[in-house]
Amino acid sequence: MSPYPNILKVYKQYDPIWVIGLGIIGVLVISASMRELNYPRDFVGKMGSSQLLSTFINCSASYKSSHCLKRYKKDILQDFASVLMPAVHAELELCLSALSPSETDAGVLMGVQSCLLRSEKLNSAFRSSNSIPSKPSSQYSKGYLFFSISSVLVSWWISWKSSSSNAQQPTETANAKLELVSNDVSVLKEKIFGLEKSVCNLELLANSYSQKEKELTSKLEFLQREYNSFRKVSGVTVDPRFPLDSGNIGEFSRDHKLQRDKSIKVGDQTFNIATKDGLDKWKTFVHQSIGKKPEIEPKSQTAENETPSPQIDLKNLKTTDENGKPFRRIFVPNRGWVSSRKLQHELQLLS
């Protein structure tokens, strides 16, 4: 999406005259800031892009740094003359000449770096105190004129674009609303189609349920007829409390149950529970048997095959642990666990 519509929405709320004035002021401020920062940036950029400094550093990696400085000093000074004040340039020359040839390679490289940093600070100081001669005023006048004309053209173009966008805004709004309506209509059509499908599915389910109901009704009628024919043939009687219409089949009559012989023999007595008389006798016998208590034979004090348990000497039992701490409970053979207090009391009684 293009950013121009967002810019136009901001600028169309203001008067074009104010837009033009603000544009001119902004261009003048930016151009003045660029002019103030011109010299320091040129010097720093020169330090980073100087081929002679790179050549000097590469030479120091292979040869002695003092010899390389003596060889490339004039070229370095000439290279930085375009971005330094004459006084700062002379100070840089004195600083490089003051480096002792007897210093180590690292000392020479650090000295060159210190001289360049010192020159950069002096150059910035002279610039801030207006010691650096400015460029001809005609060049700045041409620059300001160019930027002013550019800002006027940009402001006019923005105003024209804003007016054209205002003219096109109602049409775009109408198109957007029409598009939303068309989208809503398409969504509504899809919902209608979904409802039609649901109605068709419900009709199919209703038809299938009605068909199953007919099948179950026919099967139930068939079972009713079969049951009626079976009842006529077998002679089954129906309990009047549970008619056939309720779905419960009546009980068989007592005559059919009496035809089966079910006898229970207990000792020399036999009970036929298939008959009512035999069932009553069986109930009476069971109640009488439950009421009787079994005779318990007296137990002899000592069985013949039982051996007397050996006597345990309580004094020989271990009552303390390895550290001399008494146990809370002590295991006594043929008795189990006994508390230490109870065992001590028994020992006192024995003694």
Image (spheres, helix red, strand yellow):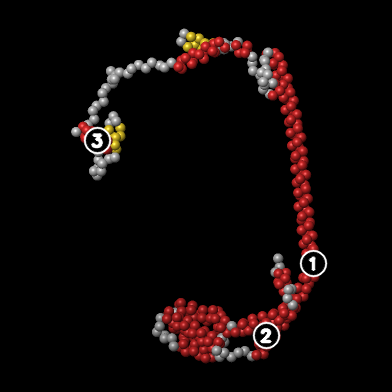
Name the residue beneath numbered marker 2: 143
Q: Which residue is drawn at the image coordinates 55% and 89% (left, top)?
A: 129
Quarter assignment of residue 17: bottom right
Type of amino acid under label 1: Pro
Q: Is residue 188 shown above or below 297?
A: below
Q: Earlier in the sequence, mark 2 or mark 1?
A: 2
Q: Is residue 304 shown above or below 38?
A: above
The x and y percentages for residue 155 are: 73, 78
Assign a secondary structure to mark 3.
helix
Measure the alpha-carbon separation of dots 1 and 3.
113 Å
Name the residue beneath numbered marker 1: 170
Measure the alpha-carbon separation of dots 2 and 1.
42 Å
Assign a secondary structure to mark 1.
helix
For discs 1 and 3, the disc positioned in front in the rendered view = 3
The x and y percentages for residue 166 are: 78, 71
Type of amino acid under label 2: Gly
Residue 345's mark?
Answer: 3
Q: Which residue is drawn at the image coordinates 71% and 14% (left, top)?
A: 232
Q: Which residue is drawn at the image coordinates 78% and 65% (left, top)?
A: 172
